[in-house]
Amino acid sequence: MSTSPADLSEQEQRRREERTELEDRGVDPYPYAWEVDARAEEILDTFDDEKHQPADGEAGSYEVSIAGRIVGLRVMGGSAFFDLRDESGTIQVYVRSQDLGEEFYEEVFTELFDIGDVVGIEGFAFRTGMGEVTVRAADDFQLLAKSLRPPPPVKEETEDGDVVERHYEVTDKEFRYRQRYVDLFVNPDTRDIFRRRATLLSTMRDFLDDRGYLEVETPVLQPVYGGASARPFKTHHNALDMPLYLRIADELYLKRLLVGGLEGVYEIGKDFRNEGLSRFHNPEFTMMECYVAYKDYRWMMDTTEDLLRTVTTALHDEPTLTFEGHEIDMGGSWTRVPFFDAIEDATGFDLYQEDADRVHDVAANELGLAEDVDSDMDLGELLDEVFSETVEPTLIQPTFVTDYPVELSPLAKKHREKDGLVERFELVVAGREIANAFSELNDPQDQRERFEQQARQRAAEVDADVDPADLIDEDYLRALEYGMPPAAGLGIGIDRLTMLLTGQDSIRDVILFPLLRPEQS
């Protein structure tokens, strides 16, 4: 949002005047580059009093060139201390008029530099009389970016040198989501979340790469959307004069690659669903999908356990974590329970092979879900609602829920032993779905019948003005007719997994720039 001069605060107006005065004095408020050879954390970790501490009045041997943002400033006559924050952490900097020149120190630094400014320092590290490792700006000190907006002040309460509580002038989460750039530079906890997210992704890639699976990229813009039941975002390609959709899943293109002879493929990428927002849903989200030929969902359960233990250990140094007060053990034996058994255990009702009328009656009249179900819902929707309300919140330790009804799984292979079921599992941890997997359907005739049923339902609910035939991915069916080997597929929601492994209760806390309503003036 643009800001008119009349809307500027007193501080914002003063900082703009300081910028003008800097330029009048020949100081470029936005120079081009600065050579950085050390970080705050590195200096604090490696400083050695015996090797590096200078004698009184002499330059130290630990010479550094650092850069970062001023986050605290204390001027005391002809010298000053300020806290400099870079990506790694915060370190104290000492400046003297003798080193900078009296004119620069008194008329530029103390008058025209502010908290929030980005600066570069050349000098050496030493330990002050108070025992704090500090960088002295002995050789060079430059403004690298003038901050025209004051950052929100942060007050820290410490105990034995550790921060135990941090207070912000701006505590509104929406402010932090909209101005993530401010959140990142004032809040080290936020930076840590996204470093951990990056570790999660790199660990997952290493795990899959080490097993010989190929990372690939498939189209985001698709002529026919598929792989899940969701409302898509629609756009139009001008040159080809054709509608296109942002993908709602990666699945159908990845399985085309199995037809092509690639026996293990995966993709980590963005999917898009034109649906509601909540603390568990963002319209743009990240998925990892993996497909391996000649395997089934039982094999994939073992692999998923191994993968998530590895990722958890990478972030926590052990396969355990605490989430919302629960101690969760990702290293133990994971429970495996069939879908209908889980419902019966939670409710006392055996709903296997019951029709929609019976399930609706039980949900509405016996389970107290009358406000959540209605008579227009089909069997799959009713069963999903019963499971979501009565079972899912109770599953805290890692649990594979297996053998779903076919109505909920149009892309999974029919169960080899039980009528009306498919070979599918969902992994639920701390009451949240984390992963979803199938023994993949590779019978083209069976797939066509399920596509046609799904297309009729989708046209009625989502795309009423579209011919159901136009919603069927004929090219994918053609690929299956060439023969796709039996395969297991896995999808993991990266955002929800990051929430779990970093202890966050909203998906917006693990997405750098979540979608929000338009900002009001």
Image: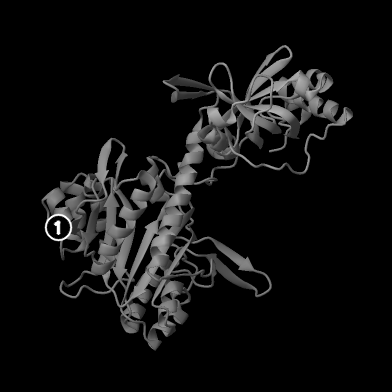
Mark 1 surroundings: few (<14), some (14-19) or many (≥20) residues within 10 A:
some
Q: Nearer the viewer, residue 469 or 337?
A: 337
Q: Picture coordinates of residue 334 (x, y %)? A: 21, 54
Q: Residue furthest top?
A: 77
Quadrant placement of the N terminus: top right
Q: Nearer the viewer, residue 86 or 214?
A: 86
Type of amino acid at the residue the image marks with label 1:
Asp
Quadrant placement of the C terminus: top right
Q: Going 44% across and 82% down the picture, which residue do you hit?
A: 260
Q: Nearer the viewer, residue 295 or 378?
A: 295
Left or right? Give the position of 177 relative to 80. left
Q: Secondary structure at mark 1?
A: helix
Q: In which quarter of the view is residue 435 placed?
A: bottom left
Q: Identify residue for label 1.
A: 341
Q: Residue furthest bottom?
A: 482
Relative to 347, say whether 65 is above or below: above
Q: Is residue 373 visible?
A: no
**Colour convention:** one colour
Q: Going 42% across and 41% down the picture, which residue do you hit?
A: 506
Q: In which quarter of the view is residue 445 placed?
A: bottom left
Q: Nearer the viewer, residue 444 or 310?
A: 310
